[in-house]
Amino acid sequence: MQVDHFDPPGNIDDFGGDANLKNLWTREMSGMFEDSVALVTQFLHIHNGGICQFYNPFTHGRTAPDLAPSLGDIPWNGFPKRFASTGPGHPTRFADAEPSRVTGQARLQDEYLEWHVNRNAAGKIVSIHFTCEAWDYFDFLAEHAPTKILQLYQTFINPAVTRADLFPGGSYNRLNKWNTALGAMHLTHSANNLGAEVFLAASATVRRQNQGVELTHSIPLIQCAGYGDDKRNSDPNIGIAVNNLARQGRMITLANPVGLYMSGFDGSGLTLNGQPAGGFFRVVRGSFPRALRAVYELPPAEGGAGHTVSDITIGGQALEFGGQLAERITMHLFGIASVAQDVHNSPVGCGPIPTAVAPAHAAPAAVAHTTRLLQARI
Amino acid sequence: MARATRSPREPLLDVADIQGNILAGFNKDQQLLLMLTLRDIPAARRWLRRIVGDISSLELVHDFNALFRKARASRGHDPAGIIATWTNIAFSHPGLSKLTSTEEANGIPDEAFQAGLPARSATLGDQNPGGSADPTTNWKIGGTGNVPDVLLIVASDSMGELTKVADRLRPNAGDGPGEPQVIWEELGQTRPDMPGHEHFGFKDGVSQPGVRGRISARPERFLTVRRLAPPAPGDMEFASAGQPLIWPGQFVFGYESTDGSSGSSGGPIKPAKLKPAWLKNGSLLVFRRLQQNVAGFTKFVQDTAATIPGMTPDRLGAMLVGRWKSGAPILRAQQNDIPALGVCPLANNDFLYTANSPPPVFLPGTQVPPPFAAAPADPNGFVCPHAAHIRKVNPRDQDSNLGDQFDTLTRRILRRGIPYGPPIHDPTTDDGVDRGLHFLCYQSSIERQFEVLQRDWANQTLNPVPGGHDVIIGETANQQRALELFTSGGTASQTLTAPTQWVIPTGGGYFFAPSISAIRDVLGAGS
């Protein structure tokens, strides 16, 4: 695959016709790829592991045929595995997954999907807002399009949001009150960002071995390579899917637009007074399979009848937590893999890929982005 | 030596108290399902006390099955003279509530069971052909307003014996006024023309997990016979080729269950405390009456195969199922069926998806199977599509949207299905006869096991691995299901769309199969 630019996540029209913003975003994304390629290349060079099978489709696009797109699709469940049921008598800990937050406090939801539950004075759920937009994209907007970011908050969180709320002291505060205590504009968990996504995918192209045996299962692989959190649905699954393709000798990248997406919602069995209520889930930014933001709330007619979301049942169970719907959301990452190439990499021993680029191995662009990448590491 | 270290860790199963169909399986040619409603509770208790001595234990069923297998192995065919008739029983949430209390029935730690199948039916993707929001209104049994209290299962090698036992066990006036009433019954039978095959023609029940646990205090007496050498530390352990070992709490309350969390290596987790305590040795039973449209399926396979160069209907059917009709996995028989492989239990389930299947290391004394072609790694689904039925409901070593291969173990169920209705004479012509499968499965969490397989995997295009719906059992709002077949080394693909469902739920229920002591001392006790 080769691209001549990078689009914003979900092809969302945040840039309008601003060519400068588009170019800046392309440079931003390309930098993330360059960082990752440089770090992996350096690591492989040091360990005689071969060539980097991850590439930047903007600067080093490949003309080799790619596999059918679905072969690079990687899904995972949106509800955090660490809070999921572990067996009979050990129920899912929905309440633990969504404790109330205060300003400055990130959410605990770590599957690249976070949500905020709005309740009325009686504690009934009025709406549930889901986001999978990475915080580094919002950092970008904050730096280059502060008016746009304010507009997004006012549109999706509350018209009362002010610039001062978002930029106290002049700098964007990701963990401002509208993105923590009062809402969810974008992801807050430290791991939930595009830089981490790109670096994880790049790192997972490295073949690994432990005591001479190549690792081909997700958990031993991620524990060996250290490219993510082995307690999640997402990171191990992304890692092994990419590594499977790498072991087949393929060149790998991420599809444009790069993002972490909601690709589907299963609303079967949601009812309000016996009538289907799955359709109350609405994507409000992007669209399936690249949805960025969604809300679950009653249509005005239903809300006007005195109902709340708390009156919804799922297979006979009352809807009490946003996590019950997060369980029904499939998250998605879109990879791209080429046909098998003349690649003969060797498995490398365990240990994470260092995030510091030695000057001798670094491309100039990589050095500039190293700080960002360090921040992005999981 | 490794075997000696394995046995002490596995729990001693209460084989006299666990009902036999759960962990051993009846495996009979005839199986009668009787659904009952409880009217007068004292009469219901008297009836339970009368029949509890007929409830077949795990010990009886296991020992019989072992004897039967031994006789079959020595004679080379099923031993005609060795027969048995077994009975098991299970209760719905309303039934248990009547016999105990709603509070006690709610002690069963599964919200799906508590809600009941009518409330869960829509979450499974079931549709009402009449358009009602409640998919169950037309069901023959188990729909809203028609939920039975009790499911009685009587199974036998002999139809005559089955009838005699069933008649003896039916409630009668001797149980007192208001005795339980049979509100529905139906006979399931193995196909006389193709024993062990369901109505589409495919061998059923090939892949069953191996349940850990000992059946006597002797260290080497395992419920599931061990035929393979122990694996390397951290690797999945198999009882036989393709039969992973799962801790018994996955199917029966009160025992260690398989840990599906990351890095667990499938190790055991302690059972949760049961309240009430009489839940121990019980299991959750799902029954689904699945009507099969054989002509619709056959026509789809024939018509679609004709549009794909080089494809035959049988091979396309094998790609949709993941196995040929004989039971031979398509990963080990890529172009044509190999019937000898299909009937070889030590080879027909021996394959992985993401890695080349290593040759099994059998323990001494095991009759090594013939050298069938080994299963190659197929991580991309080029041979066995990701949407093939057996791959959708059990992705084996391939990670799913929910976790790794050990998480997948925690989704496994024990299937005890049997066909109902006569085989179709001409599978290309709809004869209007009602036929299908009495799908029965046991687990300790309907929500985490059966419902995940149906709702989150079979019905979805992206889960557990992207590639389309399970067109065999998957359900969607408009009945259309699609799957992707790859060509040209994966650089191109073809989407096949099934226009309608061939498997239609027409009844069912969620039940709890208690221990025999609970039936005797709790449910049947008192007046």
Image (cartoon, coloured by chain):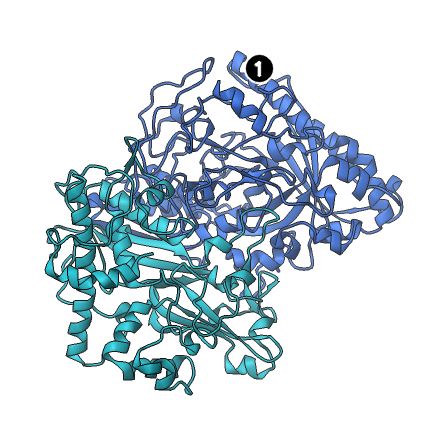
Chain colours: A cyan, B blue
Q: Which residue is depicted at the point 65% across and 22% down?
A: B216
* Residue B326, placed above or below residue A226: above
Q: Amino acid at mark 1?
A: Ala
Q: Quadrant of the N terminus of chain A?
A: bottom left
Chain letter of the residue beneath label 1 in the structure image: B
Residue A3 or residue A350, whichever sits in front: A350
Q: Which residue is depicted at the point 89% across and 45% down?
A: B527
* Residue B70, placed above or below residue A307: above
The answer to whether residue B127 is left or right of residue A131 is right
Q: Position of residue A58 (x, y in %)?
A: 14, 61
Q: Quadrant of the C terminus of chain A?
A: bottom left
Does residue B481 appear anywhere in the picture? Answer: no
**Label 1, on which residue?**
B71
Q: Position of residue B309 (x, y in %)?
A: 22, 43
Q: Which residue is depicted at the point 71% across and 48% down?
A: B275
Q: Residue B364 falls in which quadrant of the image?
A: top left
The answer to whether residue B508 is left or right of residue A52 is right
Q: Position of residue B129 (x, y in %)?
A: 53, 60
